[in-house]
Image (cartoon, coloured by chain):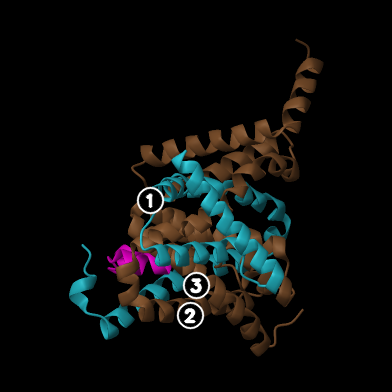
Chain colours: A brown, B cyan
Amino acid sequence: MTANDLFSLWNFLSASPLLALTITLLAFVIAQRLFLAVGSNPLANPVLVAILLLIAFLSLTKTPYEVYFDGAQFIHFLLGPATVALAIPLYRQLDKLRQLWLPILVAVVVGATTAALSAIGLAWYLGGSLKTILSLAPKSVTAPVAMGITEKVGGVPSLTAAFVICTGIIGAVIGTHLFHLLRIRDDSVRGIAMGVTSHGIGTARAFQVSWEMGAFSGLAMALSAVATSVIVPWLLAWLDLRP
Amino acid sequence: MGILLGMMLILMCQLLGEALVLLFDLLIPGPVIGMLLLFSMLLIRGHIPESLDQAATALLNHLALFFVPAGVGVMLHWHHVGNEWMPIVVALLLSAVITLAVTALVMKLMMLLFGKPSTYDSK
């Protein structure tokens, strides 16, 4: 086999979804093994580790993200059905939901406002550009909603998507430590805070803790998506932040 | 067969959700509407069908994996982040800490004000 053969083999493989799908699963399996090997330490968050491994691989092989995503989109697609499936754990918590609807609603509205206001305030105070501030504002909600909001207020949707992913990972990594420090032990409270702050990635982390925390996180993620799409455009108009 | 039936139901809810979003020009994504539709359906039926439970469990057990392809997209933004890394990193980190703490404390306070504490102590 010559170098030329290898090159054409690589060309063939990288053009089919097979390679992107295989390396995504491989990276995730390695990340999950690592997560278990370090005693489920949230710092070794599997989503974070898998993303870093894949970025390293794509950079080393000089593969553009678009080529990778062309294949990996089949995994990405499953996010939709998985979001719909959150209705099942939620339904299991129906009794608690009936008791807690008022605290949940207040916590989600206050939380969504806090997420946007703190990000805007901090970025503005530290000299962030308007483009950064507008793209940061909706970073705590699930990516498709956040990107829709950014488009509406004049930010950059793909930059928002990057902020959304980072926020998700940050919340997933520090969440349980922070709840421990604040002595918050109730899984419904932890779930709501996780979902409001870190949307789906936080919800995936919540499911690692318990199905109850996952269910409440999923609910909070859905409610805060609705709340944020009302709050952020209004907040930015009130602060007179326009592109 | 069971799991396929459940998967079909989930996809139908998503499809209906996406259709509603397009029809009424909603800002909320289709899958979130689909989740609310499925939840309403469960409320009406009063129980979770076995096949639906299987499909949902299979999907939710791997929720974390599904975020990976979109997450790799962060690599497209090195340049912008590089120029303004300080405000971005601090805002993302601190805002996450503040939001987690405020939301959890407000929820806890509201539960103390409006709840019957004995029923909330799960553990």
| Magenta segment includes A183 | yes
Height in image: B68 above or below A116? above
> Is residue A26 something one can see in this rendering?
yes
The amino acid at mark 1 is Gln
| Same-subunit check for callouts 3 and 1 | yes
Q: Residues within 10 Å of mark 3 (few under 14, many from 20)?
A: many
**Is residue B83 visible to us here?**
no
The earlier-in-sequence mark between 2 and 3 is: 2
**Percent position (x, y) of residue B72?**
63, 47
Q: Which residues are magenta?
A: A179-193
**In which chain is the residue bearing label 3?**
A
For residue A160, what is the image quadrant?
bottom right
Q: Secondary structure at mark 3?
A: helix
Q: Which label was assigned to residue A208?
A: 1
Residue sitting nearer the eye, A35 or B51 = B51
Which of the labelled discs sits on residue A144, or is there none? none
Query: Toward which corner of the image does residue B82 lie, by quadrant?
Result: bottom right
Residue reaching furthest left?
B118
Measuring from the top left, give residue A71's x and y in whole percent: 69, 39
**Which of the two labelled residues, at mark 3 and mark 1, occupies the earlier sequence position?**
1
Residue A220 in the figure: left or right of residue B118: right
Please give the name of the residue rendered at 52% of the width and 58% of the height, measured from the top-left corner. Answer: A84
**Do badges 2 and 1 share one subunit?**
yes
Instruction: Tell me the residue at 66%/31% (across/down).
Output: A18
Q: Which residue lies under the disc numbered 3? A: A223
Q: Which residue is mark 2?
A: A109
Q: How far is the residue under mark 2 from the one under mark 1?
A: 26 Å
Helix, strand or loop: magenta stretch: helix
The three-letter amino acid code for the residue at tag 3 is Leu
A234 is within the stretch colored magenta: no
Q: CA distance from mark 2 to mark 3?
A: 9 Å
The quarter in which the C terminus of chain A is drawn is bottom right
